[in-house]
């Protein structure tokens, strides 16, 4: 015959009234055909008074001889206590009720509690009714009777109910705990929210003082044999209880603990304890959890033991005192099972269970961000750590993506705090050093990024060596010189330029291919052509919300731009770059934000192969799409000659002319099979539009014209006169003049 808990005291309606939920539950129970109500009792387990509705319930939906050990009719108590996190709970009054999965922890020698929901009560109560609650209770009993409550796709449940203490340890705890020159220090985290008392551990050297509010502990790590799924039990209070519970699961504590203590003593032995020696130890037990396919995960159990390493070694009877050397030495051989000893000595040692939370490092960041480790294994340079650059750096630090070197010559100034990563106490420091410090505070156990407070175009030894060792350079300098100079260098890594447009309504990615056949300068030209030829380019580079003077110098000026825009575009650019660098191709993409709805539209531009020609000391760079456009215009005009204005970017420093686009032949142009004279109608207005759309970056660089079929693309006498007149015109601004001739089978370039 089953035994039941005589739980609580009879309810006295003269002393107190029932909770509102209790009344509604009693009514629902009385109306349910599968429930008999025995009465209401009053219970207090130290968390405030509880109403307990005593019932006998059974809906006959499972057989008597079921694998879960649930009786067809169970005596239960439905408790109501609005002061607790879960105010309505089902408790089982049968003393032999099985300890199955999905139960709450309860005080010793008290009824078990059923965990009916896998979501928080604040979500449950939104659609909670007494009737639904009772159906959920019967569902729990039915599924538990057939051992179906814990789904196969769910992770294994914990071994023991959570402790009221939680301890946060460094991510590299194991490595540091094995360092004989370090000791673990546990400190309280004052004011931490939640039901658990929070502590935090860190390692200091043996000769460092732990501080008055810290507890220095000797740390031990040990691993036990694997444990499969089982019922959740109350946390053990002694080493013996922990050992017994592991043994009941075909594991063992005594042998690995003995071996670990033996190794910790070492051949050098231990001196007698003194007041300065820590009288507490911290033991972490790593428990492999076994699923259907082997080890599913490792549970980390943490326990503090109020004794020294010497006392624990003596409790195992493994130490002998040498009076001549006044030290304790090991007397047993390692590698064998723990010898028989007075088990009560070590078994009776009290333990304080702690829920251990290991801090995550870069690998944890990658797992949380769904990033494969192989995809993050590369060395990279982030040039420019301003508002966008620092946001990207912070994102990639947390995601554990890449090993970074930050390069930026600027310092963190007061106005930067509105949009940069940094704090007031870091003002005046180099921006790269601020970010490097941030890396230490995010994942302190990981190697910190390198920091170079110089320009990425500075030909210093440290910059050159850094670029040589990198496989990716992320340019967020928002300058022309960085991507253009780097385009000229064969020793630079694959480069991507990321920037936000002045209005904050657009962002751009210009990514070179892995082989660098399409470099930043050429991608920039195709980006400008896309601006000129697409509707989104109409206002793409329009002005910003205004300038803000932030200092007394003529260059002390910044843009007005909401911080939200930095985060919006930073998130897009970060994800898209991670996705793009996994491939070998070049990419040009523009994202445009609607200022009212904040909807984002992506515009993908297909990059075309690029070619270069050298003429009179100048390098002319052009792409196949531009050649196709010129040839198409030529074919459309045959048998007559045709031509038009050439648009591009002239870089006097590198003596490079990058062709961007052409304008259509003006309507007042003259063309015949033997000549072409470009008209002027509409050209001034069209060029003004080019200037406006491209923020005056793209300009007139020369003219092109065609030759008829059967004639080479070499300049005639008239062509040379044309080039001379163009040169005379361009020389007013000190610029070279470019003439391009398109023939039947070739295209030639001429600079003067």
Image (cartoon, rainbow, N blue to C red):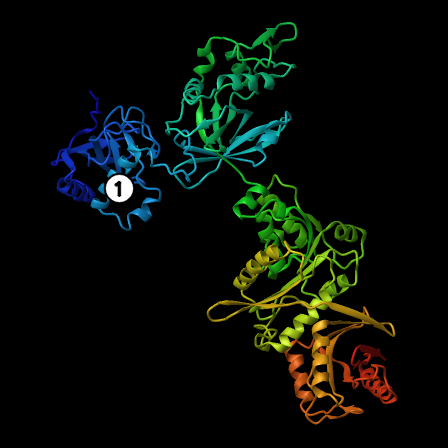
One can see residue 540 in this view:
yes
Q: Is residue 81 visible?
A: no
Q: Secondary structure at mark 1?
A: helix
Residue 463: x percent and y percent? 77, 53
Residue 464 vertical position relative to residue 249 in the rendered view, above or below? below
Q: Eyeballing the image, is 474 above or below 361?
A: below
Viewer-nearest residue: 378 or 720: 720
Residue 622 falls in image quadrant: bottom right
In the displayed image of the protein, which residue is found farthest to the left?
14
Residue lying at the far front in this picture: please name it: 710
Quadrant where the N terminus is found in the figure: top left
Q: Residue at x 73, y 76 (%)?
A: 627
- Taking the image as shown, residue 115 lies to the left or right of residue 369, namely left
Which image quadrant is residue 65 in? top left
Residue position marked by numbered label 1 in the rendering: 136
State left or right for residue 307 relative to residue 584.
left
Decide which of 180, 690 is in the foreground and name it. Answer: 690
Residue 216's spot in the image, x, y percent?
55, 27
- Whether 54 is drawn above or below 516: the answer is above
Where does the image place residue 42, in percent across and percent down from the top left? Answer: 19, 32
State the residue in front, 38 or 435: 38
Residue drawn at 75 percent across, 49 percent down: 469
Position in image of residue 80 (x %, y %) = 23, 39
């Amino acid at each position: 015959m089953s035994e039941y808990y005589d739980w609580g005291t009879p309810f006295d309606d003269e002393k107190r009234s029932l909770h509102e939920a209790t009344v509604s539950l009693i009514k629902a129970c009385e109306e349910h055909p599968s429930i008999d109500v025995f009465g209401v009792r009053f219970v207090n387990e130290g968390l405030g008074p509880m109403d307990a509705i005593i019932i006998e319930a059974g809906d006959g939906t499972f057989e008597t001889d079921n694998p879960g050990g649930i009786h067809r009719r169970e005596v239960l108590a439905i408790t109501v206590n609005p002061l607790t996190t879960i105010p309505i709970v089902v408790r089982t009054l049968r003393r032999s009720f099985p300890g199955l999965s999905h139960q709450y922890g309860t005080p010793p020698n008290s009824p078990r509690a059923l965990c009916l929901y896998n979501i928080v009560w604040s979500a449950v109560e939104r659609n909670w009714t007494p009737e639904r609650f009772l159906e959920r209770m019967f569902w729990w009993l039915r599924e538990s009777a057939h051992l179906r409550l814990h789904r196969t796709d769910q992770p294994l449940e914990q071994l023991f109910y959570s402790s009221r203490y939680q301890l946060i340890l460094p991510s590299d705890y194991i490595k540091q705990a094995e360092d004989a020159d370090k000791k673990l220090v546990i400190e309280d985290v004052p004011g931490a929210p939640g039901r658990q008392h929070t502590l935090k551990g860190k390692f200091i050297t043996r000769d460092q003082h732990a501080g008055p509010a810290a507890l220095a502990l000797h740390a031990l790590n040990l691993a036990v044999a694997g444990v499969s799924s089982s019922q959740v039990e109350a946390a053990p209070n002694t080493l013996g209880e922990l050992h017994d519970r592991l043994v009941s699961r075909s594991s063992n504590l005594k042998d690995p603990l003995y071996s670990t203590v033996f190794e910790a003593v070492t051949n050098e032995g231990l001196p007698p304890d003194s007041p300065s020696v820590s009288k507490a130890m911290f033991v972490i037990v790593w428990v492999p959890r076994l699923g259907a396919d082997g080890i599913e995960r490792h549970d980390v159990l943490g326990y503090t033991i109020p004794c020294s390493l010497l006392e624990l070694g003596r409790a195992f009877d493994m130490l002998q005192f040498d009076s001549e050397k006044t030290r304790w030495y090991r007397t047993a051989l390692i590698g064998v099972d723990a010898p028989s000893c007075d088990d009560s000595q070590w078994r009776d040692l009290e333990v304080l269970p702690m829920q251990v939370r290991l801090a995550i490092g870069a690998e944890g960041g990658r797992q949380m961000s769904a990033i494969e480790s192989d995809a993050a294994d590369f060395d990279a340079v982030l040039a420019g750590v301003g508002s966008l650059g620092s946001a990207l750096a912070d994102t990639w630090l947390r995601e554990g993506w890449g090993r970074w070197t930050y390069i930026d010559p600027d310092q963190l100034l007061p106005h930067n705090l509105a949009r940069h990563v940094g704090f007031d106490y870091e003002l005046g420091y180099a921006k790269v050093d601020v970010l490097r410090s941030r890396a230490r505070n995010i994942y302190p156990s990981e190697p910190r990024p390198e920091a170079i407070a110089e320009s990425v175009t500075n030909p210093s030894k440290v910059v050159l060596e850094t670029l040589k060792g990198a496989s990716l350079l992320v340019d967020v300098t928002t300058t022309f010189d960085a991507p253009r100079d780097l385009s000229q260098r064969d020793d630079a890594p694959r480069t991507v330029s990321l920037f936000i447009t002045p209005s904050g309504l657009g962002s751009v990615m210009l990514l070179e291919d892995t082989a660098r056949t399409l470099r930043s300068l050429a991608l920039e030209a195709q980006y400008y052509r896309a601006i000129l030829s697409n509707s989104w380019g109409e206002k793409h580079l329009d002005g910003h919300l205004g300038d803000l003077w932030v200092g007394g110098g003529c260059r002390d000026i910044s843009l007005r731009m909401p911080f939200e825009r930095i985060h919006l575009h930073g998130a897009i650019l970060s994800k898209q770059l991670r996705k793009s660098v996994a491939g070998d191709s070049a990419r040009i993409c523009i994202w445009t934000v609607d200022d009212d709805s904040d909807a984002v539209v992506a515009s993908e531009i297909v990059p075309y192969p690029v070619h270069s020609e050298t003429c009179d000391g100048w390098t002319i760079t052009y792409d196949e799409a531009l050649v196709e456009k010129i040839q198409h215009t030529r074919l459309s005009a045959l048998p007559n000659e045709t031509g038009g204005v050439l648009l591009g970017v002239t870089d006097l420093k590198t003596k490079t002319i990058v062709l961007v686009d052409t304008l259509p032949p003006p309507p007042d142009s003259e063309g015949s099979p033997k000549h072409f004279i470009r008209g002027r109608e509409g050209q001034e207005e069209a060029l003004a539009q080019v200037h406006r759309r491209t923020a005056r970056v793209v300009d007139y660089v020369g003219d092109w014209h065609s030759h008829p079929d059967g004639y080479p693309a070499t300049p005639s006498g008239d062509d040379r006169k044309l080039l001379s007149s163009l040169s005379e015109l361009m020389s007013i601004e000190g610029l070279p003049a470019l003439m391009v001739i398109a023939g039947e089978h070739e295209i030639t370039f001429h600079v003067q």
